[in-house]
Image (tube, rainbow, N blue to C red):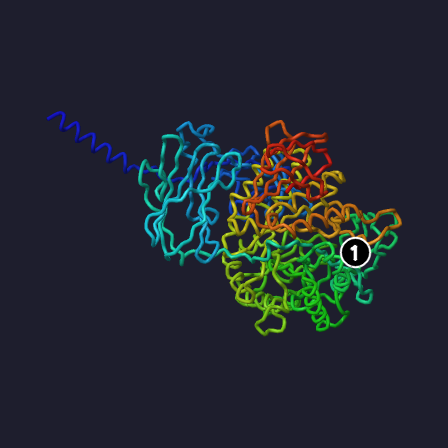
Amino acid sequence: MKKLLGGLLFVLLVVILLSININAVAPGIKEVVFKYEPQVEEVSSVYLAGSFNNWATKDFEMKDQDNDGVYEITIPLKPGTYQYKFVINGTTWRKDPHSEDYTADGFGGLNSVINVGQQIEREGEVGDGEIIKNALWHDQTTTAHITRTQENIIEIRFQTAVNDVEAVRLNYFDEDGYQVEYMNFLTYDGQFDYWHKKIEVKDDSFKYRFVIDDADTRYWYGKNGIAITMADWFKFNKEDSLLFNSPEWIKQAVFYQIFPERFSNGNKENDPEYIETYKNNEERYKNIVPDWHQGIKASDHHYIDSEKFTDDSNQINPKSGWHVLYGGDIQGIENNLDYLTDLGINTIYLNPIFESTSNHKYNSSTYEFIDDNFAIKDDPEASNQLFIDFIKTAHQHGIRIILDGVFNHTGYEHYAFQDVVNKGRNSKYWNWYYIESYPITTLYEQRTQGKEPNYQCWAGFGSLPKINVNNEEVREYIYDITKEWMDPNGDGNPKDGIDGWRLDVPTEVKDRNPEFWIDWRGHVKDINPDAYIAGEIWGDASQYLKGNEFDGVMNYRFRDAVLKLLNESWTINKFIDETNKIKAEYPTPAFNSLLNLIGSHDTERFLNAVGKDINKFKKAVFFQFIFPGAPMVYYGDEIAMAGGQDPDNRRTMIWQKRPYSNKPNDQLLEFYKKLIQLRHANNILKEGRINLSIQNNKSNVLIIERELNEEKIIGLVNISEQAEEISLEVGKDEIINLLTDRKYQAKNGQINITIESDELLLLK
């Protein structure tokens, strides 16, 4: 009887064990403490804002619980890298003086950076039969983990601890019954390995789960987490999922960013007469147009002083250079389309071009008309037609046009805001903005009397009043503007319009209206399904890259990583981990649609950032053109233009030798042309998988492999200041450096190469 009972208990125990599930919890959620001790005397409030909350300024209030002058808050964060600042008294932004790292904030300052790591049980070891359970993870709600990339194709990902398991299998049911597929290794980031598999979904819905193997140990993983066997199924409904469908052409794109006011002056008759600064409530100061080669010395004046122009340098000093206008225009761009096509450019991103008082045009006075200083003086209709003709000419050159969409704010001079200034509460546009009191404080009063804007504006700048994107009239206005420039003649065929949008500070729009970009994307894709949408996001953009908002973003994370590697703030292993993180956090269509930049109108010129070391600069450019995503050249980078933070990063384009011996760097220009030509000629560099590696921890050579259809191209970059030796398995008798046409003979499929510190290799 005892044996019978014992047997029954054993069977019961086995049944229980076989049905146990360990509930799935996001690995590594950590309680992170932020502290700040203000360095100002009067503090009414301190808030924490960062990339983890869309930079919202009222979400996380910090408290001085102990009355010791130190404000604190604790918030839960997933593993990842975040940027943040402290917001003092609602308007003053401060970086954390004790931050572990910093990165450019886009306004000439720095954001604090925090890396939230995962505390896993131990280091993994493949084949030891011990699987680190708390690293196993699949989040069905995250687009990076499951994405519909084509109508009937989905990509599924799974996470394990790095170097911990031998295999991950995907089990699923479809119309053909029970299926088992081994998942492929995707990437790693120093803590985790990521596995993926693309499968065809034949039914509207199907179910799936995972099997993880290491030696004799096996775990199952399903919707309720880890199971000893037969985990519960995840269920997927194709009709309820988003199709992440970025334009196919973006893989072929090479972008060129133009700041129109500083690229080329093709028509002196439209040169600006006034600057944006007011000398009273109604009138602005006159502009004096410098010669194209001249720089601007420091000045305390609020007007343009020609005595501060200099023939000795093209540097634009911030104490006087914010407001000056040189006269660059659309005709100047059109005159140089042949230069751009010869360089290999096939897409232009233009900073704002709509009517505005400033040189940067982010303070639009109307979106309906092109600025006449860029087109035809005092003729709005003719100015619009000139730009439409320019689009046609650019398209004939094989160049697409992307415009800067500034829909977070208008300019102070916008007709709707001016109506509020003049009529107050009686204006029909009063609820287009966030007005706090009347009458409106003018820009002249703000500058001369130290008054604060009594309306919400971007970053505290009174010239940039925020618009109410929850107002139906405002939304319709933005929709109409969007259509006007995407289909100018309104015939339903977008071929005469622009090819996409780069969106300025989209996080602030989403903060006020979480659905805005979702709805706006639908509107854009209805007009032109092939249009490209990129957002200005400086940190992790995962929440915008789900297939229902943006196709890609400006990849400032790439720039930061390259800069820190070349300036020796990061090791090669750290660089690999952080760039792989981008790949792991973004769905594949988004990862392949990023704008890979090393400079923009919001950053110090990269040449300056690396101490004007041309070899370091060339290494950064090399990274741009062999990484997945679309490389974007900031105007003048290709000829080694220098420049500090804004406004010095917006110097006039150097077209010929100048009096102070500054001239285009023709050797660098040829280097750009060669890289662009190689990218256009090799699909591997546009569509191939990427793998970053280092042979050992003592090596200073970064290995960048691109692979497509079993064909490889290998990039080698020596990060050190001395020659390095490296051995490579190439699987063939001979390879060639595509940059120099030099051939290398292999022995038994292996080559030994000495790489000089200033040498770059692209082997095929």
| 316 and 127: which is toward the camera | 127
| 286 and 150: which is toward the camera | 150
Callout 1: 10 Å neighbours few (<14), some, many (20+)? many
Question: What x and y, as percent, mark residue 366?
Answer: 66, 66
Please identify the quarter of the rendering in which residue 120 is found: top left
Question: What x and y, as percent, mark residue 678?
Answer: 67, 49
491 to 672, vertically: above or below: below
Please identify the quarter of the rendering in which residue 239 is found: bottom left
Instruction: Please indicate, yes or no, whether residue 463 appears anywhere in the rendered image.
Output: no
For the point 59% across and 53% down, the residue is: 251
Question: What x and y, as percent, mark residue 39?
Answer: 64, 37
Q: Which quadrant of the figure contains the N terminus?
A: top left
Identify the amino acid type marked 1. Answer: Val
| 429 and 539: which is toward the camera | 539
550 left or right, relative to 218: right
Question: What x and y, as percent, mark residue 545?
Answer: 52, 52
- To which residue does mark 1 refer? 324
